[in-house]
Image (spheres, rainbow, N blue to C red):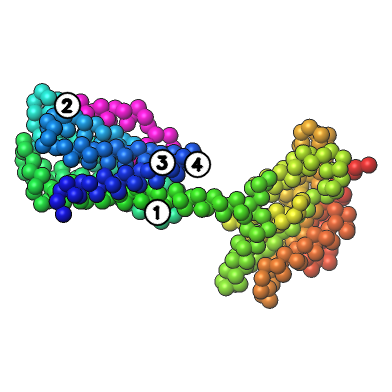
Amino acid sequence: MGASHLISLNIAVLGFIGAVLFVLWNHDKRQKTALYWAVALTLVAIHWVVNLYRGEWSDTLVVLLNNPLVSLAVSLTVCATYIRVDRQPPWALLAIGWFATILPLCWYQLVTPHTGVRILIVSTSYVLHFVWAGFISLRYGPHRHNADILMSLCLVALAFLCAMRVGFLIHAGIPNALDHRDPFVASIILVAIPSVFVGCGLFVVLAIGLDLMEELRNVAERDPLTNTLNRRGFMARANQELQRAQRHKRPLAMIAGDLDFFKQVNDRFGHAAGDQAIVTFADILQAACREIDIVGRLGGEEFFVLLPDTEDGQAHDIAERVRTLYEGAKFDDALINHTLTASFGVAEMRTSDQEVGQLLSRADKALYQAKENGRNQVIVANKTQPEMVTNKSLSVA
């Protein structure tokens, strides 16, 4: 395949990936990583379009069009990397880097023409930028998917390829003319670097696509009011955790929590007050739990927490802490002068449990017992003398 055919293929592939990324950004404006990569790949594709006219246009025109475009594209990949890891891009530093590349390039093209020095300047700049982007991605990246790691490795690979070009120039004595027909030079410029750019774009598309799939799954599995898991999400993850605990013979506990007199709160103060009561309880509950704990809202005001590597005594202490904090919580608007409480049931996994529903049922029965015993207390399943707490729940006439 001739050089022009390779360049045409690069233009088509990079342009297509850039278009896909732009569509992804247009679908979800939060995906700014997609936008920056779309612009970067489009600029690289335009650079190859200009290359098609090398020989027809003056060398100076091609250089002064191409190098600023590619340098801007490389800077945008650094920006995209920062945004991907939820950090603010260092715009001033990137602007300084761009000018520090382009101004010497113009000097060695217009004032003191020297092809070798010019290519050395831009190649060194690309090495620094890609190393920078690769480091940020590997060090701070979300790495939620393998695509993120592969994209980071592509950035490192681009830095390596540009470093090889620098090494070639130095080894050749930084010649004033570079033979692009040299097999080594051609393989880097026409094949390797564009291919890795394409790889970067593909992995960005894959990573963002996986992000969107994960978001859709979260929408399907999470309660929109409290951001805890809904019944579907909770049961799926809890069953996995129960199987793991049974397999490794590790303790597992369940807390069931329910707001006291919640219907009366809704009837007297309205659904906005009821939502406030639920959200406050969910916030306190999640703050008391670890990252590995599984929190779900399975009913209107009923919550469950699955606690890995936890015995019922430890789960009791957590539930008691949540009960105390909720009883002392301060509310706004209609509930500002009122105290709300919650009741809890605790159960521990048995070796005979085959599914999480069995553990959940025992915790729910303990919760029902707490309600029957006067509310605002924690009952541990199979405990005949649970700790009793004086009922101070909201009384609604």
Residue type at tag 2:
Cys
Q: What is the x, y in percent for residue 307?
A: 64, 60
Indicate left or right for 33 with 292 as reference. Answer: left
Pointers 1 and 4 in contact (CB under 8 A)? no
Numbered tag placed on residue 22 in the rendering = 3
The residue that disc 1 covers is 147
Classify mark 2: helix, strand or loop.
helix
- Residue span colored magenta: 77-106
Measuring from the top left, give residue 8's x and y in whole percent: 22, 46
Rendered location of residue 69, percent (x, y): 26, 33
Camera-nearest label, 4 or 2? 4
Q: Badge 3 local density, few (<14 within 10 Å), some, or many (20+)?
A: many
The quadrant of the image that shows the C terminus is top right
Disc 4: which residue:
28
Q: Which mark is residue 245?
A: none
Disc 2 to disc 3, C-alpha distance: 32 Å
Of mark 3 and mark 1, the one earlier in the sequence is: 3
Q: Is residue 259 magenta?
A: no
Task: Please tell me whether mark 3 or mark 1 is closer to you in this view.
Answer: 3
